[in-house]
Image (cartoon, rainbow, N blue to C red):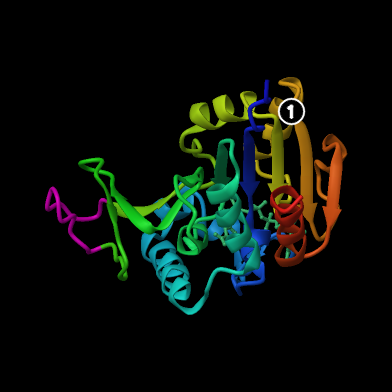
Amino acid sequence: MQQPATSIVILTGAGISAESGLPTFRDKDGLWEGHRVEDVACPEAFARDPERVQRFYNLRRAALATVEPNAAHHALARLQQAWPGRVTLVTQNVDDLHERAGSTGVIHMHGELRKVRCGHCGQRMEWLDELHTSTLCPVCGRGRGLRPDIVWFGEMPLQLEVIEDAVEASGLFVAIGTSGQVYPAAGLVQVARSAGAATLEINTAQTAVSGCFDSHRVGPASVEVRRWVAGLLDR
Ligand code: NAD
C-alpha cells in the first residue's frame, strides 16, 4: 500500500522577505529600519508614545505597497498547491507577501501589518490606511483604542496551540530565514525533533538554533527554497 505523503510545516522569518526589499532586523545590530525594537515594538513603547509607534507601523504598512513577493514566496505557494500531503505555512512576518504569492491558510503568529484591533471592543479588522491615536474605531466608535494587530515583545503569539499541533503531526519541519532568537517560534524545531520529524534549516548564515536541525541549506532563500521545492516536486 502506498504511504501517505509527509506532512510539512514551514516556519518563515524576516529573511524570506529580505530579497523583496523588506529589511530584517537582526542583521543590522538589532535595529528595525533604524529603530530600537524596545522603542516601537513593545506594549510599554505604545503606552509611552502611541503616536510614535503608530507612525512606525504606518510607514511599514505603506512600504508593503512598494514590494513584491520573491521566488522563495512563489516556490512555497507552488509547494502548497502541488504537494500531495498537508503543507502548513507559519510565518513570523507581518507582511503579506506569502498571500500575494498565492499561499493559503498562512498562520501569522506575530500578527499582520494590514490588520488592526480595537482595545475597547476587541474587534480585528483589515486596515490599509494610516492609523493615528485619534482614529475612532469604526465598530464601537471609541477613540484611543485602535492599535496595529501585531504581537509585540512580551505578548503571546497567535494560534500557538494550532501551530504546535501541526508541528507534532508533521514529518518534516523547515525553518527559512529566521534567526532563532525569538521564542516560542525558535523552540518549534525542538517540538518537531521530539515528535520524530526531520528538520531542515534554510538561511544565509548560522543561527542561534542551527545545531538543532538535521540538515541545512545555506544561501539566499530565493535560490535555496526554489531548489528545495523543485527537488521535492520534480523528482
Ligand atoms: P531576524 O531579523 O531576527 O533574522 C533574519 C534571519 O534571516 C537571519 O538569520 C538572517 O541570516 C536570515 N536571512 C537574511 N537574508 C536572508 C535571505 N536572503 N535568505 C535566507 N535567509 C536570510 O528575523 P526573525 O527571526 O523573523 O525575527 C524577527 C521578528 O521581527 C519577527 O518576529 C517579525 O515579526 C519581525 N519582522 C518582520 C519583518 C517582515 O514582516 N518582513 C521584517 C523585520 C522584522
Q: Residue furthest bottom?
A: 66
Please tell me in which quadrant of the rendered image residue 173 appears. Answer: top right
Please tell me in which quadrant of the rendered image residue 21 appears. Answer: bottom right
Q: What element carries label 1?
A: loop
Ligand 1's quadrant is bottom right
Residue 45 lies left or right of residue 72; in this view the side is left
- Return the x and y of residue 229 as percentages of the image width and height: 70, 53
Evaluate whether residue 207 shows in this view.
yes
Residue 137 shown in magenta: yes
Q: Residue furthest left?
A: 141
Residue 46 lies left or right of residue 40; in this view the side is left
In the picture of the structure, the residue carrying the numbered disc 1 is 197
Residue nearer the viewer, 180 or 218: 218
Q: Residue at x 70, y 51 (%)?
A: 176
Disc 1 packing (10 Å; few <14; some 14–19; many ≥20) = many
For the stretch drawn in magenta, the main secondary structure is: loop
Q: Which residue is drawn at 62% across and 33% down?
A: 7
Please tell me in which quadrant of the rendered image residue 70 appears. Answer: bottom right
Residue nearer the viewer, 134 or 163: 163
Give the residues drawn in magenta, as a range: 134-145
